[in-house]
Image (cartoon, helix red, strand yellow):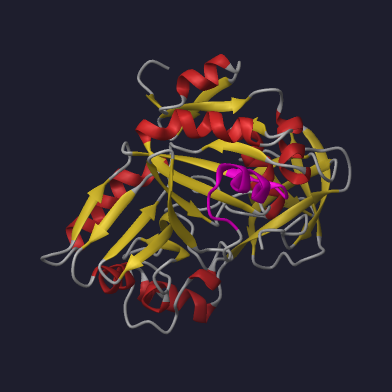
């Protein structure tokens, strides 16, 4: 993995005995003590993830918000300063999802974007090509670290660190900590109450150490647990559930589209698909036996193939296999389907995620 980029916290992960792997071209921790233990820590207590592999970019200049509003699906123009929005960048010709990301609005002239690691360069290239004179798209991917403090005890960690906490979901506040700037974002990817701390890479190691020492029981967590947590919530992952070949309409992400806006990438093709109805939809799968679905596995109904699994795992909370699958639109909620799990047929119920209750607020 010598060609992979490394987090500023890489040495910390090695010292903690983390198993690492490739995430979007970055060598990141998969697990420390174990996925189930780390998953449970977030659901019941508090855990911290290094998600510094995520992209970071500034869009600055007169009309920055208005420019992004013409590109991205969300109605960003209605988001006040200090708030964030989950949104999508779609291909103008196909309507397929280039990336899903969070936009943090600082002012009408400055927005901080957090896209997926593997898509950052391509997304920023598209934005630069479309940007009007005076609007700059600045890659900050290597300038900041991001720590995700997630779980019902997350506020205790922020209290111990003397950082802002308790602000509304999808909002953020700037603060100082030990001489370093920290942006405290009420966002995350686990379905639990939590915060994402954005700080310059120079301060990352000290902040990581402080989080781990802040309260008894805080656990370092790897991206393996982050995946099981997000799957239980039905949160999509780009490259699996969202792709250039999948539209927001198919993926059940129409809620993230400002349909009344006069312009955004892919608008015309997406409006047409919405009016006609998509030919397939992203659905949840809950196991009726011991089967654990994995991406790429075929889904059948009455012997005929009706789709494929896009994400799948064992749910540590429910103690059963769960997954997401792109299924023919004719397959309805509560239908029973079969998944070929390594040559063995397993039964699943089609459901609407989340699989467990959300506690983000």
Q: Residue at x 53, y 16 (%)?
A: 14
Q: Is residue 208 above or below residue 307?
A: above
Expressed as whole percent of the image width and height from the top left, the position of residue 240 reads 54, 46
Q: Residue at x 53, y 68 (%)?
A: 249
Q: Is residue 261 above or below residue 100?
A: below
Expressed as whole percent of the image width and height from the top left, the position of residue 246 reads 49, 57
Q: Quadrant of residue 350?
A: bottom right
Q: Could you say which is closer to the camera, residue 56 or residue 97?
A: 56
User: Which residue occupies the extreme right position in the image?
Assistant: 289
Q: Is residue 67 above or below residue 340?
A: below
Expressed as whole percent of the image width and height from the top left, the position of residue 186 reads 55, 57
Q: How many marks?
A: 0
Q: Could you say which is closer to the camera, residue 84 or residue 355?
A: 84
Q: Could you say which is closer to the camera, residue 169 or residue 353?
A: 169
Point out the stretch of residues depicted in magenta. 149-165
Q: Does the image show residue 297?
A: no
């Amino acid at each position: 993995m010598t060609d992979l980029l490394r987090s500023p916290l890489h040495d910390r992960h090695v010292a903690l005995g983390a198993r690492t792997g490739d995430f979007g071209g970055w060598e990141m921790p998969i697990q420390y003590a174990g996925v189930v233990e780390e998953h449970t820590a977030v659901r019941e207590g508090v855990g911290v993830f290094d998600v510094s592999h995520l992209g970071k970019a500034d869009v600055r200049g007169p009309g920055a918000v208005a420019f992004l509003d013409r590109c991205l699906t969300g109605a960003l123009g209605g988001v006040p300063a200090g708030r964030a929005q989950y949104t999508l960048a779609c291909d103008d010709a196909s309507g397929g999802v280039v990336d899903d990301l969070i936009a943090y609005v600082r002012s009408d002239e400055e927005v901080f974007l957090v896209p997926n690691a593997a898509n950052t360069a391509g997304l920023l290239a598209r934005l630069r090509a479309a940007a009007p004179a005076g609007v700059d798209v600045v890659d900050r991917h290597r300038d900041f670290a991001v720590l995700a403090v997630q779980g019902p005890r997350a506020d205790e960690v922020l209290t111990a660190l003397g950082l802002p906490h308790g602000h509304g979901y999808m909002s953020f506040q700037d603060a100082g900590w030990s001489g370093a700037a920290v942006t405290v974002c009420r966002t995350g990817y686990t379905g639990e109450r939590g915060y994402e701390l954005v700080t310059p890479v120079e301060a990352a190691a000290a902040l990581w150490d402080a989080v781990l020492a802040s309260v008894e029981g805080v656990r370092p967590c790897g991206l393996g647990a982050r995946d099981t947590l997000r799957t239980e919530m039905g949160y999509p992952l780009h490259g699996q559930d969202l792709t250039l070949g999948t539209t927001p309409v198919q993926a059940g992400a129409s809620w993230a589209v400002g349909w009344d806006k006069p312009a955004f990438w892919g608008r015309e093709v997406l409006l047409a698909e919405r009016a006609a109805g998509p030919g397939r939809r992203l659905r949840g799968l809950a196991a009726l036996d011991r089967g654990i679905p994995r991406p790429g596995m075929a889904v059948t109904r009455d012997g005929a193939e009706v789709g494929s699994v896009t994400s799948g795992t064992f749910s540590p909370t429910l103690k059963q296999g769960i997954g997401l699958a792109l299924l023919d639109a004719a397959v309805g909620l509560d239908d029973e389907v079969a998944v070929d799990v390594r040559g063995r047929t397993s039964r699943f119920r089609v459901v609407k995620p989340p699989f467990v209750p959300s506690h983000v607020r």
